[in-house]
Amino acid sequence: MIIKKQIMTKEKFEVIYRKHYPEMYRLARTMLYDTDESKDVVSEVFVKLLRADIEPQEDKIEAYLMTSVRNKCRDVLSHKNVRERVEHLFQTEMMQNRMVTTNDDDRLERLNAWIDRELPPLSKQILKLRFLGEMSYDEVAKATGVERTTVYRHLTKSIESIREYFNATTKR
């Protein structure tokens, strides 16, 4: 099925690209419902093909490319699910905390102090970049030099910790 890579010529890559791009894009578009993300997924698959130490055989290239697109789309959808859960948790927290009395400033100062004291440095940095810096997940990942999934995981854990902190302080 897979053989050691022989240097792929520009011409061979162009033939593969022209032949398979439309159906790869259709598959990604069908799975993601997003034009830009679909183009990104297909582009990433072609980049992976160029950088790989292996090259699929001629008769297996279509299956390889379509499987790669499907798997990459599944990854994107998985990341979206995590992102949506984190955003929902944060929005829920924010909505609950908007109905607080004049002690808001004091509570916010205590929360900031708690965040600075209790969260690990990377979690603190990610949380502040995302919500205070209003950066996208991709921007936060690039700024911190970590993967998007790492950003999601740190935000999820940070928000859970903040929720526990608020639950503990409101019971007092």
Image: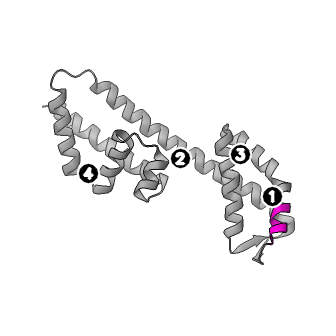
Q: Is 10 included in the stretch rendered in magenta?
A: yes
Q: Which residue is mark 3?
A: 28
Q: Which residue is mark 2?
A: 79
Q: Which residue is mark 1?
A: 17
Check disc 4 and report its element: helix, strand or loop. Answer: loop
Q: Position of residue 152 (x, y in %)?
A: 44, 48
- The colouring scheme, among rainbow, by chain, secondary structure or one colour, is one colour
Q: CB under 8 Å between callouts 2 and 4?
A: no
Q: Position of residue 63 (x, y in %)?
A: 79, 59
Q: Which residues are magenta?
A: 9-15
Q: Which residue is mark 4?
A: 119
Q: Which of the pair 70/148 is nearer the observer?
A: 148
Residue type at numbered disc 4: Leu
**Crowding near pointer 1: few (<14 within 10 Å), some, many (20+)?**
some
Q: CB under 8 Å between callouts 4 and 3?
A: no
Residue type at numbered disc 2: His
State the predominant SS element of the stretch in magenta: helix
* The label number, if any, that marks residue 50 in the structure image: none
Q: CA distance from mark 4 to mark 3?
A: 38 Å
Q: Is residue 39 above or below residue 9?
A: above
Q: CA distance from mark 4 to mark 1?
A: 46 Å
